[in-house]
Amino acid sequence: MPDPQTERSPKGAPEALGVAGARLIEFIKRTALRGIAVTERSLRIPGGGSPSLDPANLRRIRNFLIPVTHPFLGAAVHETPLIEALRTAVLEANIVLAGSGIGAEVFRNHPGLTRFEPAPDPNRDFRGAVRAYRRVVRSFDGNPWCAFFTGWNGRSAVVLATMLAGNGVRAGLSVVPALVHLPLSYDPAKSRIANNLRLPELLGHTAPSHLEPQVCFTTEDFRAACDLLGREAHPQMQPLAVFVTQTSPGQRKKWREDRFVAVARWLIQEHGCRIALVGAASEAPSVEALQSAIGKDSFSLAGHTSVPVLTAVLAQADVALTLDTGTLHLIRAVGLPACIIAPAWSPPLEWLPLNDPRFRILKNLDLASQPADYVIDEVSVDEVCGALGDLMRRYPSSAASRDARVRRGLRAEFVAAAKVARP
């Protein structure tokens, strides 16, 4: 996953200009953005329009705009705890998320949001994003507001669009810190979730050091998941194991297909499991080929699930085997016990659920970078079977566990109903 605190040069720039030229372009761009920030503040201060940064006034802010432009599933999921932390810190908070794409799918049903505002990615449609953000600001009725930026959402186009939307406090992680009033530096000694949870502290609120992610789904999503699984919840049904076997080509997190097949057949024979293989539409051919190799008691859902429907599928499973990729974070969000096959080059602290007994993280090497043609051969079939067997003994298949995960995922509907009833 690219570093969200850097911005890519225009396509082809490194090839045409070399590294030095690309760096010069980046320097000029950042200098210009700093100039914009200085100009914006100097023009507003004489007119009394600059937002107050007085600590007492910051703590009184109740309106929040959170732009979401993530192209990465995992990064969006790791931002969901911020909503819970903000809602806890500011009980009367009016939290509006504006976005589209994968981030919108993740957040759309979150119980902590006041509402969701569709908005294009400013990197693709800058004017459209400004118009959408202005709609949100107008809904604040002239009251003080704050925009929070996390990771990828702190890229310069997003912050500039927010600047043009109205006169609010801008706070958080940004590629160009001068563009925000209250900048936050990313702490590599903390996880992504822990860094995101630091944002309310910029306004003087106490925030928890850790909260687990939450991704919700509707009853329609739940019914669609039931249809895909071919059964309704029942105490005596076969245990369901979900396999996540694909990652993006550039991530180099592959585990050999014959090993997935061996583990699947072991789960079928020793634990009576059904195996559901999930993935994106682009991954369907590879997933279906793997499903054919496993054979009986396995099926592919690749290309048949949105993020909410996939979350509802995971909530009804009993255990998962997954690579370190986007769907892992949905597995974590629903609390499904899982064995995680982690690559040697990826730092566990940043993304993985450490010190949680529901997860077994198998990472047997530590490398500083991604080797070419890397395959996670250091993790064996026996290790994976042992970890899955231990999880199934500790967290046995039960209707009660599945129902608890489903209830947690459906919680957004009850909150939405309460909002509708509110005068």
Image: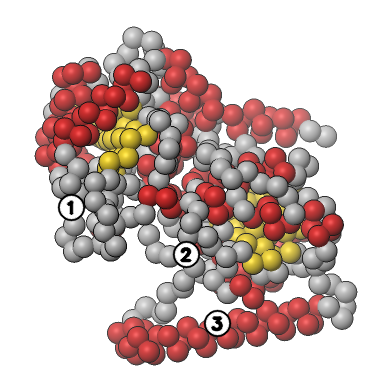
- Does 397 sit above or below residue 292? above
Residue 171 in which image quadrant: bottom right
- Does 201 sit above or below residue 290? below
In the picture of the structure, the residue carrying the numbered disc 1 is 375
In the picture, the quarter occupied by the N terminus is: bottom left
The residue shown at (76%, 78%) is 41
The answer to whether the residue labelled 3 contacts the one labelled 2, judged by CB atoms less than 8 Å apart, is no
Question: Is 254 left or right of 231, judged from the image as shown?
Answer: left
Tell me which numbered mark, 1 or 2, is placed earlier along the sequence: 2
Label 3, label 2: how far apart the Cα atoms are: 15 Å
Q: Position of residue 318 (x, y in %)?
A: 35, 24
Q: Amino acid at mark 1?
A: Val
The answer to whether the residue labelled 1 contacts the one labelled 3, judged by CB atoms less than 8 Å apart, is no
- Does 65 sit above or below residue 236? below
Q: Amino acid at mark 3?
A: Arg
Q: Position of residue 55 (x, y in %)?
A: 81, 60
The front one of 236 and 363 is 363
Helix, strand or loop at mark 1: loop
In the picture, the quarter occupied by the C terminus is: top right
Q: Amino acid at mark 2?
A: Pro
Helix, strand or loop at mark 2: loop
In the picture of the structure, the residue carrying the numbered disc 2 is 4
In the picture of the structure, the residue carrying the numbered disc 3 is 30
